[in-house]
Image (cartoon, helix red, strand yellow):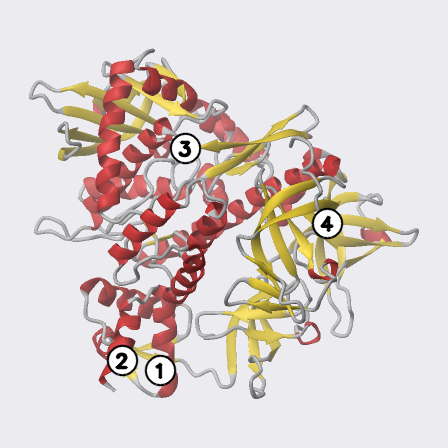
Amino acid sequence: MAKKKKKNREKLAAFNKKNLKNAVLSLLYDDPGKTVNYKQVSSLLDIKDQESRRLVNVVLEELCENNYLEIVSRGKYQLKSRGGYLIGLVEIQPQGFAYIRGEEIETPVMVSARNLNHAMEGDKVRVQLYARRKKHEQEGEVVEIVERAKKFFVGTVQRTKNYAFLLPSGKIGFDIFIPADSLNNAQDGQKAIAEISEWPANAKNPVGRITEVLGNRGDNDAEMHAILAEFDLPRKFPPNVEKAADKIPLEIPPEEYRKRRDFRQVTTFTIDPADAKDFDDALSVRRLENGNWEIGVHIADVSYYVRPATLLDDEAYERATSVYLVDRVVPMLPERLSNGVCSLRPNEEKLCFSAVFEMNDHAQVLKQWFGRTIVCSDRRFSYEEAQSVIETGQGDLADEILQLNALAEKLREERFRAGSIAFERVEIKFDIDEAGRPLSVYFKEAKEANKLIEEFMLLANRKVAELIGKPSKKNTPKTFVYRIHDRPDPEKLDNFNNFIHKFGYGIQLVTPKTIATSMNNLLNNVKGKKEQNVVEMLAIRAMAKAEYSTRNIGHYGLAFEYYTHFTSPIRRYPDVMVHRLLERYLEDGHSVSAAKYEEMCRHSSDMEGRAANAERASVKYKQVEFMQDHVGEIYPGVISGVTDWGIYVELENKIEGMVPISEIDDDFYIFDEKNYALEGKHSQRKFQLGDEVKVKIWRTNLEKKQLDFRLAMGNNQPGSNY
């Protein structure tokens, strides 16, 4: 009994926020009338460390906010009565049925297509549970659509003489019937946006109307606009917002110079991608008389120009982020601001909000200052230009860049010693012609110049968050916007560890610190190995997603107890929120409403997720478009995903496609979810994550952004150059 208790304690000590929510709900489901406070929950779950107890408090507040719990008295919570129903989000599967997942749902509820009752991907629904059949997964039926995820749908028009259908993009399990008088002049084969006007109870298809025609299928602009529309992202600014931006003067008012710390005579420069136009961060560096270094992290002062409760601010909040598609940027702010007034262009005086650090040669911060400044950038570097200076020691501002790089390397070393995880990001890029067609594919990896900028941005973000959020004798924490990253899911980590054992690797799951240290060792050891991509992909999947919140739980991946986003207000609205709050609190202003800012954080996290999905969709579209010219050719690849409907294979150029299980016809294959494998029932032939295979490019479907492969048997040679 003692052994079992110890084992449970070890498991509970590893709780992340999601699992802790499930544990709290399970406790209260067992005793629905029970009232608890955070100390009682901590005791019942045997949670003793201060960080986890703080997480319990966050979890109780969020469960109450999401209507799973109710407050019965100050600090006391009770389960809300729900009867035999659960609430969750719809995840449509390729086979047509759906899983309903949610914080109060311990295991996903399976709902057949006929029992979805017009529920769609992402909808928030109420589900009635069926009696569980022995050894079968939990099933149920959607009885109410609590909140629709989408109002507008983008797709391709399929027209007849008297009516048409819109065939929606994405995971939509129906077509939309469009009467002739609701076509808005849309032609057969065009990309368009439709709104559902009605959906009769017994009808298979909803009825809708075309609200906008995007253009012809296959046209690059029409396809990119369709991707933005698919994720409910904007494509252009309303005329009144553009007019408001045009009224903002480029000239700085004389009185503003007197209010700010002047850095115009200090060596200052920007380092950005070669094609960037919105320069929202600059670095300054100078040697002080005492031998230390003054490093300034200067950030475009967007909050000076974009004031609360204005057209510009409302639009920026709704967008919440710039969107980076494969061939364009859809900015959060109009071009006059993003590329002009706010952008820290060389040899132009600009307003900034700055974090200034006095550092010694060991990169230790001895003093810090935060406030409004005026700067003038001396030079605009691309990453490639700055990298050349680092590698050769020659070029403009070589001494300054080399000194900053030396300090950045020390900051990086210290960060990893503290438990930060070294995930390397490889970007897939395309050379594109004037018509938007991809000519070739290549990768961009982060080098020293990228890491130099990253380290000083991380430093500024961390120190700003500590200034406001870290309790001290002089500081009572106030409502603030944090960038949080939860601990990894213990079960996912355990499964990941079991899988990498097959390659001779392993990670230590004892504490968050040992997980991070052993994860870094693993990521270093797999570099250059055939299993590198698969191991890195699964490691990332085991991690939680970062998000914005006023409830700080730290940033696990960076190993920071306090972290925010302060450094990119031209392209991220949370950074604008942080600038405003920082200004308020530096002037001893009262704390703001936590509930209001938490709602703003949720919106920003949601929009960030949509933007990331749109960016991935645009890359996927170009990948499929690029491979259209390679149908029938054979390439080597690595199995990057295994499902019960097929295996996903990633080619050497990182383009991924799927071999449908129906095309593996030499046996009846069984999906082994635990071991990420398909295994032949009779032959025992196995297709496992990480296995090397050869595939033939079989077919491409731009409409679905889908690339299908067939396994290439025998001694077929790889195809031509990518």
Query: Residue at the location (47% across, 38% down)?
Result: 426
Q: Which residue is mark 2?
A: 36
Query: Residue at the location (19% across, 19% down)?
Result: 286
Instruction: Label 2, secondary structure: give it.
Output: strand
Q: Which residue is mark 1?
A: 28
Instruction: Label 4, secondary structure: give it.
Output: strand
Residue 210 drawn above or below residue 281: below
Q: Nearer the viewer, mark 3 or mark 1?
A: 3
Q: Earlier in the sequence, mark 2 or mark 4?
A: 2
Q: Residues within 10 Å of mark 3 (few under 14, many from 20)?
A: few
Q: Nearer the viewer, mark 3 or mark 4?
A: 3
Measured Cα–Cα span from mark 2 to mark 4:
49 Å
Circles 4 and 1: CB distance less than 8 Å?
Answer: no
Q: Looking at this view, is 549 or 456 the one in front?
A: 456
Q: Earlier in the sequence, mark 3 or mark 2?
A: 2
| Location of residue 502 in the rendering, given as x and y in whole percent from the top left corner | 45, 59
Measured Cα–Cα span from mark 3 to mark 1:
47 Å
Circles 2 and 4: CB distance less than 8 Å?
Answer: no
Q: Which residue is mark 3?
A: 446
| Location of residue 305 in the rendering, given as x and y in whole percent from the top left corner | 38, 31
Label drawn at residue 155: 4
Measured Cα–Cα span from mark 1 to mark 2:
9 Å
Q: Nearer the viewer, mark 3 or mark 2?
A: 3
Residue 116 picture quarter: bottom right
Residue type for callout 1: Leu
Asked whether residue 646 is in view, the answer is yes
Q: Looking at this view, is 193 or 657 the one in front?
A: 657
Query: Residue at the location (39% across, 52% down)?
Result: 547
